[in-house]
Image (tube, coloured by chain):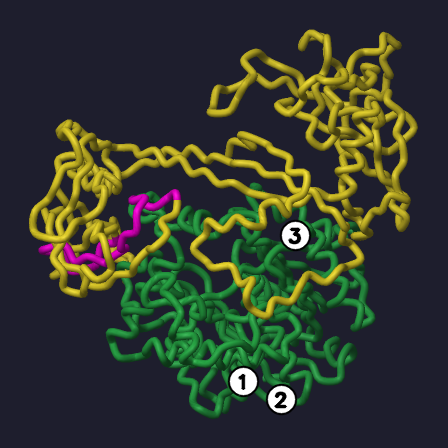
Amino acid sequence: MPFNVDVAVVGWAQTPMVRRTDLSETQLLVDAITDALTPLGLTRADVDFTCLGSCDYITGQAFSFVQNLDALGAWPPKQDSHVELDGAWALYEAWLRLQHGDIEIAVVTGSGRSSTGDPSLIYPMEMDPYYLAPLGADPLTFAALQARALIDAGITSERAMAEIAVRSRQNAIGNPHAQVQGKGNVDELLAGEYVREPLRRHDLPPITDGACAMVLASAERARQLVERPAFIAGIDHRSECHNPAFRDLTDSPSTRIAGQEAGVGRAPVEIAELQAAFTHEEVLLSRALGLGPDTKVNPSGGALASNPIMATGLVRIGHAAEHIFSGGNRALAHSTSGPCLQQNLVCILEGSPS
Amino acid sequence: MVGPASKEVLVDGRAKRGHNPHGYEERTDESVIGAQRRRSEHPMTRFVESTITFPYKRSLGPVIGPFMTALTDKRLLGIRNGDQVISPPMEWDPATGADLGTDLVEVGPTGTVESWTWVPKPSAQHPLDRPFAFAFIRLDGATNRFLHAVDAGSPDMLSVGARVAPRWRGTRRGAIDDIVCFVLGETPEVDGDDAGPKESVELMDYNASITYVNPVSPTLDRTVDASAAGRLLAQECPTCGRVYAGGRGLCPVDATIFTEANDVDLPQTGTITNFVVVTPVQYPGQTETEPFARVFVLIDGYDVVLGYQPTIEVPVDDVRVGMRVSAVWASPGEDVSNASVGGNYGRLVGWIPTGEPDIDDPDLVNRIF
């Protein structure tokens, strides 16, 4: 994909990922932004553009993101934007903004306090208001229906899903931000009760409060700031119909197209951080992206280890960038939004510019 | 948005910790890493619970309207899309966005279960208060799936391919929950006496309501506590020197987090810089009935404006820019929990004229922040 400006991730930080925090979303962001900028020798005054990803429904306040601006240090005035999406889409907007070539540094964030409300009562309100919201159609229900569709089609099985959970928990042992680590083998997990048949507890993500901040820079500035920037080699996002009842739940065409446009198949992918909040989603996403056995999936433990809504996707990009910072050549990060993987974003990070 | 409809202060938010109404499971038995104490964290954070209600009225349009109207007549409609029949009907092709017109045809009311999941612990929003299935149902004559509840009693009773029929509400209003749920078998049911169809349904009500629990910043807590003693507390930023009232936890200019060391007491007199007279529109939750003023007060000697403040004992027509005012505090024991303003200033109930001559400064009007 020809870019006007090569853009790189140069730093990122996340708050502790916990079931409930005493801190407001704004305070979480103060810490994440400070921790992302400080190691780079940057201050808030050096930032040219900011974009925040958060959700008013989760906060319970209209325009709640305006308060979050306090965490950016809004004076002197900055160019700012907001997406009612995961911070991964905030990164997409900042990447677009940097393509103009007139600015050098952007900060993007994703933040959410799921403990503020009850996820099973909040998310149905975001669904189709005529046919789905009045039924209290919740994300767990849709995830279960999609999992059954995949199992019935022979694409996965309850055992294969438990194996994904076990591997994620093992991977998460090295991740200090993981809420769920280690415990359980496949047989132990399969002995558990269904939460929503065919989903058991290990197929579900934990509920997480947390925030993530990331610093992007144009190529030249990026090389001044860090030894090995993580260059964005490809990025794309696509969406499907809002109502899962009208989609083929055994496929994710939006992921496939976004992956093709981002250039997934151009070279081997060493690691892939996928926002698979449910075990079966990892199977579907890996297929749609054409990932082979040589790609290590979710070495951080993924969204099954901690799932800070509105930041989970940006955290995936952070872990992928970390892979490049530490010498890796090519990493994939994925983020999703909406029921049953409705909208999908794919970002390819590489050690050298495109 | 209306709200907060109720506001309950929990002395210690940890009282909420045993509460788990959501479908996601608590992970307390896992290797959960505890909250690390951070520089901005307070040891005994207070939480506030509030319930927000969103009373929506939705227009149904030329396709969903007839579908909802047919529900009141215990009939289900789909819309033709080439060889397909989509139910519930959409105005546009879900894949291409093409306009589907209004070619509605009757489908169902019986159908076949294509996929299902069991809900062992229903939420307050779910159609049934006992364990049930959510299922994708292919209504007879339709080519896509229809999501609804199935009252099957036990997951053992359900399977892909099971035949189901609707259980209708006796009194139907033209909404998707006019179908209480589906039941196993070929025979539709009616719950209670059948009140019959409606003429034409063009609108639907949807009253969303959610309860939130939020932490209160320690700065706001100190501000509210000080108000009980008739003090107007503010914070002076140690980085830039600006002063903020209203319990803001950090400086919006440089993101410095405030501590108790930054507290300052403000004078309780000031000048009205600007005002608005609000003629109340009656919406759910509105308690005002007569026009009322909200004023912006510039505090004497400080670069601080308190926004959108009530006035005390001033006829609306007398409120003016330049008027000198002083703070009025609730008397001991007075309940201010339902005060229209004041949450951020605790027991500050409004501003009363001091009787001093007005300040004549045309620039005052620009100060609303």
Q: To which quarter of the image does residue B295 belong?
A: top right
Which of A4 and A333 lies nearest the eye of the viewer?
Answer: A333
Residue that carries the numbered disc 3 in the rendered image? A25
Q: Earlier in the sequence, mark 3 or mark 1?
A: 3
The mark found on residue A294 in the picture is: none
| Chain identity of mark 2 | A
Query: In the rendered structure, does residue B12 fall within the stretch colored magenta?
Result: no
The mark found on residue A328 in the picture is: 2
- In the picture, measured across the screen, residue B330 lies left or right of residue A186, that is right
> Chain B shown in which color?
yellow
Secondary element type, mark 2 = loop
Q: Which residues are magenta?
A: B124-147
Q: Position of residue B309 (x, y in %)?
A: 71, 23
Q: Gap in Å between the C-alphas at discs 1 and 2?
A: 9 Å
Chain letter for the green colouring in the rendering:
A
Kindly check if marks 3 and 2 are in contact, taking CB atoms under 8 A apart as contact: no
Question: What is the three-letter code of the residue carrying label 1?
Answer: Ile
Q: Quick check: B259 above or below A172?
A: above
The reply to whether label 3 and label 2 mark residues of one chain is yes
At x 25%, y 61%, the residue is B116
Q: Earlier in the sequence, mark 3 or mark 2?
A: 3
Secondary element type, mark 3 = helix
Which of B312 and A77 lies nearest the eye of the viewer?
Answer: B312
Q: How many tags in the picture?
A: 3
At x 35%, y 51%, the residue is A137
Residue that carries the numbered disc 1 in the rendered image? A271
At x 50%, y 69%, the residue is A335
